[in-house]
């Protein structure tokens, strides 16, 4: 082969390689996965030292396994409520498994696989408070939630003019509630159950137990990556079918006495 021909062959090979690398522009390297979770929600997504635990962590680890990613190749990233879309859009994470409700507004920016759990928005109050019995008794009360959450958005719609303070994470709200600077924390019943079961809050905080929304938890990923979305959907289906879903629930939310309500076990929808 002449030098010129070798050069041409190499160039063609390089071109073919680069075309494969960005084929369709959506191929995710599945041997390493960056997954966004919550770091401060016991029972769901919690970072303790260098250990990650909770239902979302188990679900994410299971899905990663089905995609061919071993647990040691998962890079956990904190995904606060208000940052989830941006983390996905910028490619800082491949998946978000972080008590992330599927809704139309978010679907404009990201795609969702799921639901993998159905929760409902509720209230956490001090155990000795008899004045708050549900979303209809919040007039004049100081409420706490999180920026960028459906919880904050929906309570403002349901209780116009509500006195709402938003933090960046729910654990800040729990501290404020225990300290008496707010009267209630509103978000998903799953999250509230996890806090109420913490030894320091047992007997001092309680969940009202009257959910007033439906929260379909989905796995968020880059908008339009149908290939990845379909794989994640298949993984969720096998998690539900092989008993893992129930096992993860019992392990993580069982100790808090949380029983999933209507809509569970969920039926994953087509990717959207
Ligand atoms: N599931 C709701 C949401 O996605 C509330 C919980 C959260 O903020 O993570 O906004």
Image (cartoon, rainbow, N blue to C red):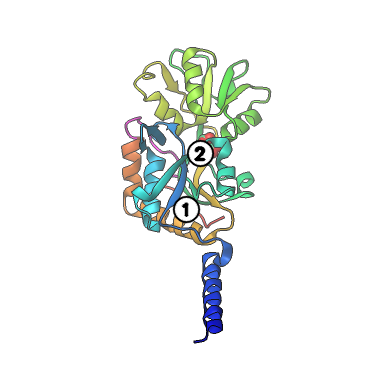
In this rendering, the label closer to the viewer, 1 or 2: 2
Q: Residue at x 32, y 54 (%)?
A: 242
Query: Which residue does the numbered mark 1 point to in the structure image?
Result: 268
User: Residue 77 versus residue 98: which sits nearer the camera?
Assistant: 77
User: How far across and down, in percent of the image, does residue 263 sit?
Assistant: 46, 44
Queried whether the magenta region covers residue 151, the answer comes back as no
Residue at image point 50% right, 57% down: 229
Question: Secondary structure under badge 1?
Answer: loop
Neighbours of disc 1 within 10 Å: few (<14), some (14-19), many (20+) = some
Label at residue 79:
2
Taking the spot 37% from the left edge, 48% from the top edge, the residue there is 61
Q: Residue furthest front?
A: 3
Residue occupying the point 60% across, 22% down:
165
Few, some or many residues within 10 Å of mark 2 (<14, 14–19, 20+): many
Does residue 97 appear anywhere in the picture? no
Q: Earlier in the sequence, mark 1 or mark 2?
A: 2
- Say which quarter of the image contains residue 103: top right
């Amino acid at each position: 082969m002449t030098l010129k021909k070798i050069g041409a062959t190499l160039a063609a090979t390089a071109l073919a390689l680069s075309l494969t690398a960005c084929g369709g522009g959506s191929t995710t390297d599945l041997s390493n996965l960056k997954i966004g979770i919550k770091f401060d929600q016991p029972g769901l997504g919690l970072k303790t030292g260098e250990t990650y635990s909770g239902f979302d962590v188990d679900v994410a680890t299971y899905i990663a396994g089905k995609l061919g990613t071993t647990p040691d190749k998962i890079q956990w990233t904190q995904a606060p409520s208000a940052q989830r879309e941006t983390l996905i859009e910028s490619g800082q994470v491949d998946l978000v498994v972080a008590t992330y409700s599927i809704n139309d507004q978010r679907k404009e920016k990201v795609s969702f696989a799921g639901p993998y759990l159905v929760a409902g928005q509720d209230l956490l109050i001090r155990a000795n408070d008899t004045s708050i019995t549900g979303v209809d008794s919040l007039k004049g009360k100081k409420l706490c939630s999180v920026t960028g959450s459906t919880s904050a958005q929906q309570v403002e719609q349901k209780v116009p003019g509500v006195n709402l303070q938003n933090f960046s994470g729910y654990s800040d709200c729990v501290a404020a509630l225990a300290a008496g600077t707010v009267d209630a924390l509103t978000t998903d019943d799953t999250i509230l159950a996890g806090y109420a079961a913490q030894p320091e809050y047992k007997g001092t905080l309680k969940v009202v137990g009257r959910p007033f929304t439906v929260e379909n938890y989905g796995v968020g990923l880059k908008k339009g990556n149908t290939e990845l979305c379909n794989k994640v959907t298949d993984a969720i289906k096998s998690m539900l079918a092989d008993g893992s879903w129930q096992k993860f629930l019992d392990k993580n939310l069982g100790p808090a006495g949380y029983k999933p309500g209507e809509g569970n076990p969920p039926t994953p929808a087509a990717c959207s």
